[in-house]
Image: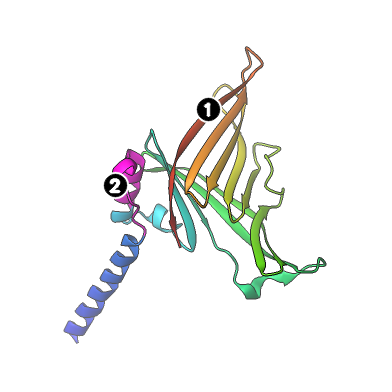
Amino acid sequence: MIVRIALLIFAVAQLASGQDKGFMANCSGNQNIPSCKSYNQMVSSKDRDLLSILSGHAYVCFRQDENTFFVIPFDQPSKDRFVPTSVPGKSQATGVVRYHRFKNGMSDDFRVVAGDWEKTAAGDNQQIRFASSSGGKTPASADETTAAVSQDEIRIGYSFENKEKTKVDYVLRVQRPTLGFIEDYEWLHPATNKRNHSTYTGHCSEFK
């Protein structure tokens, strides 16, 4: 009996270890950067904040020049969850897209965006896309986060106030076919009254 319990515990431990290894990113070559290595260290150490959101379909994206990465998890609804709309060939299902940023191994920002998945059929082609309640456009207020998911791109946007109390618009675009991304911060400089930009680029790993 004791031997059976020990074997069961060992099997469960091996299963958990195998699941964690499934979330390891490829940090070789040009991807051997601090943000990617930090992510893998957190996976290896079974960080609860990180592993709890790595479910379903997730993109983990690494900034090239600093120890910052973010996770975008979402679950595309199953076929039986889609409900036909008044438009022929179109159906919808509710869902959420999440955005979780980690900086220097610590949780730095977390957002949940509710919206609708929309499925359209045109001949043999079927498209499924997600849009937040505001349509995935640039947020109108600092409290609003928008998201849009298509076959080609994931887009996250929100606004916030910096230390100088200036409104900053943030937009993230992930190119799903290439797994590259670009982040853009835009704000109005109070002294020059001109729009300033700051951008970050990097690569993503996809898990599903």
Magenta residues (range): 23-42
Work out whether residue 133 or residue 165 is closer to the camera in this orientation and state it. Answer: 133
The quarter of the picture where residue 32 lies is top left
Query: Mark number for residue 149?
Result: none
Tell me if I can see residue 166 in this picture.
no
Residue 48 x %, y %: 38, 56
Tag 1's secondary structure? strand
Q: Main secondary structure of the magenta part?
A: helix
Tag 2's secondary structure? loop
Which amino acid type corresponds to the residue marked 2 in the rendered image?
A: Ser
- Display colour scheme: rainbow
Mark 2–mark 1 Cα distance, whole angstroms, equals 27 Å
Residue 47 x %, y %: 35, 53
Work out whether residue 4 or residue 83 is closer to the camera in this orientation and state it. Answer: 83
| Mark 2 or 1: the one toward you | 2
Q: Compare marks 2 and 1 and give the one earlier in the sequence.
A: 2
Residue carrying label 1: 198
Question: Is residue 27 on the magenta stretch?
Answer: yes
Residue carrying label 2: 28
Residue occupying the point 65% across, 62% down: 127
Q: Is residue 191 left or right of residue 122?
A: left
Residue occupying the point 21% across, 84% down: 4
Label 2, residues with CA under 10 Å away: few <14, some 14-19, many ≥20:
few
Relative to 114, does residue 144 appear above or below in the rendering?
A: above
